[in-house]
Image (spheres, grey):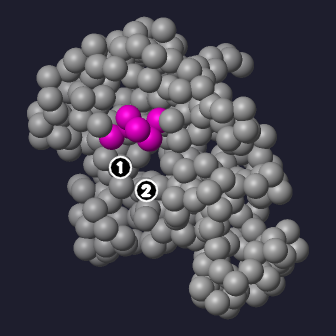
Amino acid sequence: MRPIPSSPSSYDGSLDGLYEEHLAAVLPLPEAVFRLHKFLKQYVSGPNPILLLRNRGVDRRGETYGLSDGTRIRSTDNSPAWWMHHLTFQGADFGSAGEFAREVEAVPCHIFENAKAGTRGINRAGWYVAHLLRALPPGGRNVAMTRATATQLFIRNVHPMNHFYLPDRPRGAARRYEGRPDVLSYMALRLAERYGGLWDEFIDMAGGRSEIAALPNPNGAISYTIETAEDNGIGQREFTGVLVEGREVKLRYSKNRLWFMADAIEPLGWADAFQVDTPDGSFVFTKREFYDTFSNVIASHSYRVDRRYHMKTPPRKAMRFMVLADPK
């Protein structure tokens, strides 16, 4: 299997230099992307494809539902992007449109499934998978969405021409840059150069012509800095934490630090799991694990009276509950 280069843990230079030294090496080869593009184009033109769409937590990942026009939608996190990188980086090919359709319908929709399938290599190598054109739908479930719109969102979610990869060591380092218009503009230029033969067709399939036109002029001289993590384990938590598989998360919320919300947690059953997404990582606990591990939190005035308790830095005892998740 072709090894994926590890992301740098520190860098201070231009975006152009970062691309030449690191980013280009993790992009799939054009011939592999072109093969996949051909099958994707056939798939969305078929009579009843399942379109994989990012969700905002309204739907369970992996759940399939129908639009008002009968179009089938399946909700996902960022797992299809990891899967697509795995396929194209390793140069996978498909013998027929039917074989490709079966592959799409078996795509991991949740990080745990990606881990089991061995298709999160880009993440394990320390890279953040970013999207050039926004893949999230504008709202939650919308059964009135047309098939044309859903198809564009599907292409944005899974097409490797819509993906680029930023160093994410220490964890969260990529989030400073992933959505910046100047970074998007530069990456659009580079992706167009690399995949030029089908670039315009991809942009039209994804409905992204106006978004690309609105970006500023590319400037590879813009500064890109990754600071080396302090020697406190934060930069390695994504890679040393234990992946918690097969858990149904009953409660999930995002905070700027590890934060326990009593009014949300206390109604849960002892075996129910909840997830807290933070810039330092995502953590999943059952209520019983939370009580057993954080008895000091349960007994605190902040949790009992103020109904909230938060920690500036996740403690070491929390690390075995870390999961590899996309907190979006």
Which residue is the site of mark 2?
Answer: 54
Based on the displayed image, in which of its 4 quarters is residue 41 positioned? top left
Quarter in which the N terminus is drawn: top right
Return the residue nearer the eye: 6 or 163. Answer: 6
Counting from the top left corner in percent of width and height, residue 178 is at 38, 37
Q: Crowding near pointer 2: few (<14 within 10 Å), some, many (20+)? A: many
Q: What is the number of the mark on residue 135?
A: 1
Counting from the top left corner in percent of width and height, residue 262 is at 64, 84
Q: Residue at x 37, y 72 (%)?
A: 141
The answer to whether mark 1 and mark 2 are in CB contact below 8 A is: yes
Q: Residue at x 70, y 55 (%)?
A: 314
Can see residue 18? yes
Q: Amino acid at mark 2?
A: Arg
Asked if residue 176 is among those painted magenta in the image, a careful observer would answer yes
Q: Crowding near pointer 1: few (<14 within 10 Å), some, many (20+)? A: many
Counting from the top left corner in percent of width and height, residue 157 is at 41, 46
The magenta segment is 174-179
Q: Residue at x 47, y 29 (%)?
A: 165
Q: What is the number of the mark on residue 55?
A: none
Q: Amino acid at mark 1?
A: Ala
State left or right for residue 36 relative to residue 257.
left
State left or right for residue 178 relative to residue 26.
left
State left or right for residue 111 relative to residue 72.
right
